[in-house]
Image (cartoon, rainbow, N blue to C red):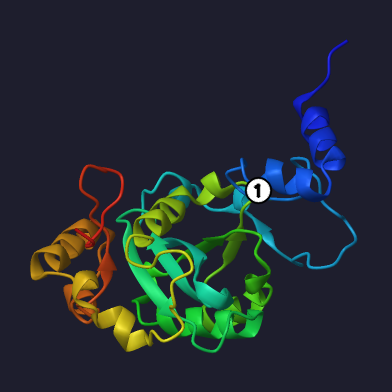
Amino acid sequence: MRVSHETIYLSLFVQARGALRKELTRFLRSKHTTRRPRGHSVMNGQGQLRATLNIRERPAEANDRAVPGHWEGDLLMGKRMHAMATLVERKSRFVMLVALPDGHSADVVADALASKITELPDQLRRSLTWDQGKEMAAHARFTITTDVPVYFCDPRSPWQRGSNENTNGLLRQYFPKRSEIAYYTQADLDGRGELRDSRRELADVIERFAHASLPRSDLKEWPERRAFARAKGAPNCRSAFA
């Protein structure tokens, strides 16, 4: 007789009770006291995003990173469920951090992202890719304000926005889990020393975007202080966090 690994795991969680559960749980890396089988979800219609564009509808120029202006985004969580938003440009791996001092409800996130991304020239805001998080439930509001369509990854598929996932991992060096990030203002995130671009990095951005026929004057208007990735030993991600 063959028994799947899920059956074994579930039986251990079901049988463990009281002191035995505590004794077994301490050996688990996650310290979870219950187990939900992979792929299990309660499909009751609550919390599902509506009227979304799937990532498969994203333009080919975004998929092959041929043209700048296509972004990936997510929330970076801190202590007491406070968060900031991170935006990564797919071609250059250029990073912007967005403060969320008023929480991360859908309307707040949509307005904060819209305010930040409209700082860019029109040619550099072509699309945004996000996961299935409910913080983007007001994606239509964001699109109306910015004229930037939002494409959503498949459920439980973080690799579909891998540039952002990788960058968030690097950011954890400076914003560890359970650290207090609620007090960071937008000026703090733009101006912190370790997140500040050097002029050489800014020139690199201009050079990378030159082929897109963007006016150099537009690029010079970008704020010079940005979290622009250059990770030592990681050729596919750029971070200023060295």
Horizontally, residue 123 falls left or right of residue 8, namely left
* Residue drawn at 20 percent across, 63 percent down: 205
Amino acid type of the residue that numbered disc 1 sits on in the rendered structure: Arg
Q: In this orientation, does residue 215 appear?
A: no
Q: Quadrant of the N terminus?
A: top right
Asked where in the image residue 110 lies, by quadrant, the reply is bottom right
* Coordinates of residue 180 in the picture (x, y in percent): 44, 77
Mark 1 is surrounded, within 10 Å at the Cα level, by few (under 14), some (14 to 19) or many (20 or more) other residues, namely: few
Nearest the viewer among 33 and 199 is 33
Residue 72 in the figure: left or right of residue 120: right
Residue 195, percent from left and from top: 24, 71
Q: Nearer the viewer, residue 174 or 66?
A: 174
- The residue drawn where x is 35% and y is 56% is 170
Name the secondary structure under disc 1. Answer: loop
Image check: 7 left or right of 182?
A: right
> Horizontal and vertical percent for residue 147?
53, 76
The residue depicted at 77 percent of the width and 67 percent of the height is 50
Residue located beneath label 1 in the image: 156
Residue 117 at x, y percent in the picture:
42, 77
Residue drawn at the location 72% of the way across and 49% of the way down: 22
Up/down of 228 relative to 189, above or below: above
Quadrant assignment, res 118 = bottom left
Residue 103 visible in the displayed image: yes
Q: Nearer the viewer, residue 117 or 155?
A: 155
Residue 218, above or below 150: below
Residue at the outermost left position: 200
Query: How many marks are shown on the rendered structure?
Result: 1
On screen, residue 110 above or below 19: below
Nearest the viewer among 30 and 223 is: 30
